[in-house]
Amino acid sequence: MNLQPEKLAYELSSPGRIGVVLPECDVPVTALPKDMLRDNLPLPEMDELTVVRHFTRLSQKNFSIDTHYYPLGSCTMKYNPKINEATAALPGWRNTHPLVGAEFSQGAIELMFRLQKELNLIGGFVAGSLQPAAGAQGELAGVLMIRAAQVARGQSQRTKMIVPDSAHGTNPATCTMAGMSVVQLTSDADGAIDLEALKAACDDTVAGIMITNPSTIGVFERNMKEIADIVHAAGGLVYGDGANMNAIAGIVRPGDLGIDVMHYNLHKTFSTPHGGGGPGVGYVGAAPSLAEFLPGPIAVQENGKYLMRMPKQSIGRLKAFYGNFAVLVRAYTYVRMLGEGGLRKMSENAVLNANYLKARLEKTYPVKYPRRCMHEFVAMGNIAEGVHTLDIAKRLIDYGFHPPTIYFPLIVPEALMIEPTETENLETLDAFADAMLKIAEEAKTNPQLLHDAPHDTPVGRLDEVGAARNPVLCYRS
Amino acid sequence: MPFIANTDADRQKMLDTVGVKSVEELFSDIPAAHRFPQLGLDRALSEMEVMRELESMAAKNASASNSAWFLGAGAYNHFIPAAVGMLATRGEFLSAYTPYQPEVSQGTLQAIFEYQSMAGQLLGMDAVNASHYDGSTALAEAILMAYNQSASRHRILIPAALHPEYKDVLRTYFEAFEVELVEYQGLPQDGLKMLDDQTACLVASYPDFEGRIQQLAGVADAVHAAGALFIVHADPVMLGLFKSPGELGADIVTAEGQSLGNAMNYGGPFLGMMGVTQKLVRKMPGRLVGQTVDGKGRRGFVLTLSAREQHIRREKAVSNICSNQGLVMLMTTIHLELLGKHGLKKVAELCWNKSHYAAEQINKVGGYKVAEGQFFKEFVVKTPRPAAEIAEKLERRGIVPGLPLSRYYKDRTHELLVCVTEMNTKAQIDLLAQALAEVGV
């Protein structure tokens, strides 16, 4: 890691420097409307090398998959194959335009058609849309589809969505954005959906349920089919949150278990890079009950030609054009390289790696719901007097590991959510487990070491309260 | 198996530690009837084969790298310096997650802070968030912000000449709400007549879908006097030269940032930019990075004001946005630093001069007529034959002349939206005018 302070671009700026030479104007000049022009454009002035060193040095202040193990629960930080970058950079994708017309973009539509098909097969869905730009937008698509279907059935009084208390924050926030209200369902003693509570919640104002399976505690909802049956019998529809698809792709098709609509994150399971926050893709797949409501347009094939079409009762567009296309190229590359056998091996190894780490750690870091886990598990970090999960997370950094997800899900106190992924080798898993066990010892013998962690980073723990109280959101000279 | 390190021996060791006999046993919670289905996926390919397949598919698309390209309409062919891609695809940026652990994410966090700083200057706003999915969803969320300001204001005034796909996105986003989307014809000044005490905001497009730039002076005061918010959707390249929306009194500014360092990529990933005035910061969706200090007084950056966001507020959050367009935003940050103060202005000037030269040349061709009025980078041309027919003919000759407006407006069959950027040479423009003359008769 680069521990040296790095100046801001504005502090590196010097009047008169330029980073890019643009061509001279080769046409006659046209007068500008002077009264509409700005007086000043306060951007930095830097030469190219200064910019290159600046961003290279900044990059060295990051942990990343390429440099460090990153067992961040719920985020599926698997290796992002380099071939994905090579295929996505082909000029035929990069430099083509969404409005050039189907005839002049047959390759792009064909890629979307093929990717839709593979993803539909993986989920057991009859149709799917690649429009949503992220998981949360996939969720929005799904809930809007459920809403539209209920309205089409003459059930517009159904304005409530059931959401378990273990769900990601995006689930309830999505319901609000889709104009629905949320009925929160308390998990049972196993961290699973409480069937009796579910039955009680299902009345004629319920539009559907949002369910994450495997759930956020990393276990498979054994009663998935029954849950779907209860909701369907009550006139509701079932939304599947595919955040945890990395455990079940090639193992079970969610569509076979009664899910009507589901998103999966191509930036998790399908290996496209997270890019420090995005871009992602939240593909949505649908069962026959909701296929015509999918957001569009989606790719279709007619008479040997590929075309973009709006499904008949589509909820509409979620963004301009067709989705985060360059991300689709990466995901397609990955699916093609895995094939059916590779996909199953992916999930199998993800689940095996997680169970292995759990076996090595659970005696020291108790697991609140100690069932067999899927691709991740949730341990607890309050293992010694005065020591918290945050301290363990920060101390892991000293050992060269990115911390797991912490304090989520909310139903587990002091949660440490660990997702190893399938792309890590046994030596890495062991080194991580060894570090966790060593930290557990330190928590008893020298807790101050944990409280002061991390020690060898560009900055130590930052004053987040101060940052929020007096926000400084941009550079001012 | 690609991208998996575990050998059979490793797996056996792990199974022994877990205490199960086989990997299958780990999936016993899944109903047996549905376990391990045959999916019917296509056969797996090696890296060599997959590259070959994708090269041949990509080659079927028309590409700005081997055509004279005059198509814009929301996705633009601009110059991107080589350093942008080289730096942004460094693994340390590319394969990092959202910077939730600030001590090991200062690279990403400082880059976002620099983006917020530069974008704030460009848009003329006090605070800019760390991105939306694209310009259209940024605008939708900006309008939702205005709508949520007051229980009694549900009218949204939008320009008739807003990008048609943006209008579609607004309809999708507002479907579930009591929002009344009202289109005004002509200038934002014309929209002012429609303001009432139920209006939440007036939106101006700067420039509009047909490239027209409007005088926005005075609009903000009138909108504010009616108790509504003034939202401007802008072209950030134009802002290299023209007054910022902030200077013109906008409360919220949105923009499509693709033009700043990102390829067209068949329409995505793009960059939704949003800036607000100080007053609205705590109502704003999306991630924000703030400057702070550590225990030793060293400057550092953190995600801040997260009490607005879904992972804290759940159903009471201002938006459900989580993953955003981080890497796209990073490319824009690098791009803006390379172009700098002078470069972006120069790009805007080149777009201005070249598009006006092109308009003049095309106007001279018999049968073609360029729409009147101020424009930036894009303009509408009336064509002597159906524009779609002309476009197809020219595309076969390696010239992509623009967007036939019939794509969005059935009755506008004889109109072409032409876009000219710094990427178009005089020779290409002359070629376009000549080709239009040839197919026009």
Image (cartoon, helix red, strand yellow):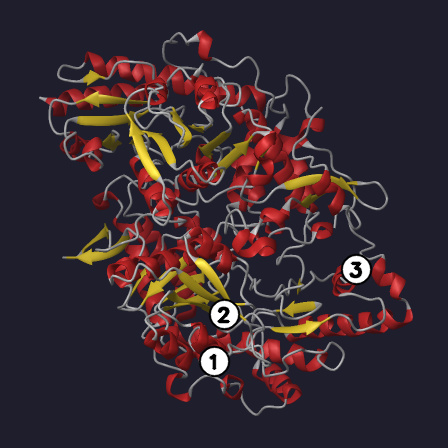
> Mark 3 or 2 closer to N-term?
2
User: Chain letter of disc 2?
Assistant: A
Question: Which residue occupies the foreground of this view, A39 or B107?
Answer: A39
Question: Which residue occupies the foreground of this view, A93 or B107?
Answer: B107
Quarter of the view holding residue A72: bottom right
Label 2, label 1: how many angstroms apart (C-alpha)?
Answer: 26 Å
Q: Residue A340, labelled with which disc?
A: none
Kindly give the residue lying farthest to the right in the view shown. A445
User: Chain letter of disc 3?
Assistant: A
> Mark 2 or 1 closer to N-term?
1
Q: Residues within 10 Å of mark 1 (few under 14, many from 20)?
A: some
Question: Which residue occupies the foreground of this view, A22 or B354?
Answer: B354
Q: Name the secondary structure under disc 3.
A: helix
Give the labeled residue for mark 2: A246
Percent across and percent down for residue A372 are 58, 83
Q: Residue A195, labelled with which disc?
A: 1
Q: Is residue A211 in sight in this rendering? A: yes
User: Chain letter of disc 1?
Assistant: A
Q: Name the secondary structure under disc 2.
A: helix
Percent across and percent down for residue A102 are 23, 46
Q: Residue A398, labelled with which disc?
A: 3
B286 vs A346: above or below: above
Label 3, label 2: how many angstroms apart (C-alpha)?
Answer: 29 Å
Q: Residue at x 50, y 74 (%)?
A: A214
The mark closer to the camera, 2 or 1, is 1
Q: Is residue A22 in sight in this rendering? A: no
The answer to the question of whether label 3 and label 2 lie on touching residues, with beta carbons closer than 8 A, is: no
